[in-house]
Amino acid sequence: MIPAKNLKFNWIVFLTALTIAVVSCAKKTSSITTNASNPWKKMDLVLKSIPQTHFEDKVYNINDFGAVADGKTLNTEAFQKAIKQCAANGGGQVLVPNGKYLTGAIYLESNVNLHLQDNAEILFSLNPKDYPIVHTSWEGTEVMNYSPLIYAKNKTNIAVTGKGTLNGQADSTNWWIWSGGKNYGWKKGIPSQNDPTNREVLVDMAEKGVPVAERIFGEGRYLRPNFIEFFECNTALIKDVTIINSPFWILHPIKTNNMIIDGVTVNSHGPNNDGCDPEYSQNIVIKNCTFNTGDDCIAIKSGRDADGRRVAIPSKNIIVQNCKMIDGHGGVVIGSEISAGVNNVFVENCVMDSPNLDRAIRIKTNSKRGGVIEDIFVRNLEVGTVKECVLKLNMFYNVYGSQTGNFIPTIRNVSLENVNVKNGGKYSVWAEGYAASPVENITLKNVKIQKVDSVYLLKNVKNINFINTYINEKKVESIKH
């Protein structure tokens, strides 16, 4: 038999513990509710968590390794000697002085900052043989193909900085003609990526599960190289450089975490000239940049079809701040290579304006791609002119023929807040989902869109909220269905 005084003590202990548990639970619930109602706090936490690059105070001038600034001498070997010695000595800055330097592929090593002086220009060779076969990716499918112009794989603490220029020298007489586009110099009889043995063969290999090491392309396959690709890297920086005339995608972090792209200017109007394509990547910050491109300004990716599902790494915690978007298919785009999904995208304080800018915010996928795209937050946009629409969410994206399959995508939780649009194009919101998978939970708050042809085009959309939103000066009511 338990003594009465012990029973009293046990009850006091029990009630005290219960009170603490209830209070603790209430605090946790409150915290969860706060984070859910204010996702921008999560963005702040991500920003604080990203490590900064740091380099030894040592300088390795490429001229000391034999580089010649005449725009004609091939300096590939000089670049690599400087980079390797810098890395071997613990890292530092590889300096590209003022002048024009021709080179083939540049391979970065850990702890190396490739720094361009203000009037330095790196001219990249137009000879495909100067870009050896490496493990890379092409339109969301991993492949052994021409090396990107600047490439790093499995490196840590790397950077490309300075106010100089990176010039891919691409135009309609060389790389761009490979696209098969008549606007880029292609004519019938000229080989291109669209030939039956090229792009579609790669996609078919991925669908059949052919190992990446056996997907050998390169010479005779006409798949153009990316410009800057950091593959499976961590803690990276690209800052202040100007990039022009790219063969293909321009900034391509793939399977890379903790990267900052700051103050970069991209001016390249070639085919598939996306400005920045984070793919299978996390904790990526794109800020203070200007994009004037032949394709999407920023396009967040996570692999194409079977290859994306094989890799299965979603892109997440992608932050876009204080950027300017001029020409392009879209300002900030998610997809279409999106099979592993995307979440936690934050876009704020950007300006988008051009008669050649098709859309401001866009999500594009289909039932071959699949993917879960969720938690996309946009605020404080100033949009001058867009051609087609302000917000486009499309589960039926189709640009390469039949794009249907058994992988129904998910799009949910997309928010636009404090957005002003002067010329909205054809639609304010264009959203299309499946009956079994509607586009869900779309919010426009404090949005004003002028000079738009139609308020919206909606198909299989559930719960679209218009809060203090005016389109063509008329307040728009929410739709719940």
Image (cartoon, rainbow, N blue to C red):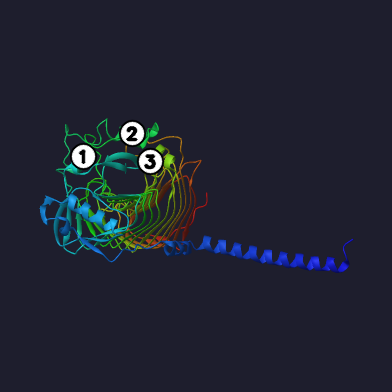
Quadrant containing the N terminus is bottom right
- Read off the residue under disc 3: 304
x then y, percent, for residue 213: 34, 36
Going from N to C along the chain, the mark reached first, 3 or 2, is 2
Residue mark closest to the camera, 2 vs 1: 2
Q: Nearer the viewer, residue 346 or 303?
A: 303
- Read off the residue under disc 1: 178
Q: Nearer the viewer, residue 49 or 374?
A: 49
x then y, percent, for residue 58: 26, 64
The Cα atoms of the two marked residues, 3 and 1, are separated by: 21 Å
Q: Is 159 placed left or right of 29 in the picture?
A: left
Going from N to C along the chain, the mark reached first, 3 or 1, is 1
Q: Which mark is residue 214?
A: 2
Q: Residue 259 is drawn in which quadrant?
A: bottom left
- The three-letter code of the residue at mark 3 reads Arg
Q: Residue furthest right?
A: 1
Residue 416 in view of the camera: yes
Given contact means CB atoms under 8 Å apart, are the residues at marks 2 and 1 in contact?
no
- The three-letter code of the residue at mark 1 reads Trp
Disc 1 crowd rating (10 Å Cα; few below 14, some 14-19, many 20+) is many
Q: Which mark is residue 437?
A: none
Disc 2 crowd rating (10 Å Cα; few below 14, some 14-19, many 20+) is few
x then y, percent, for residue 153: 33, 48
Q: Residue 351 is drawn in which quadrant?
A: bottom left
Q: Is 124 placed left or right of 42 in the picture?
A: left
x then y, percent, for residue 355: 25, 55
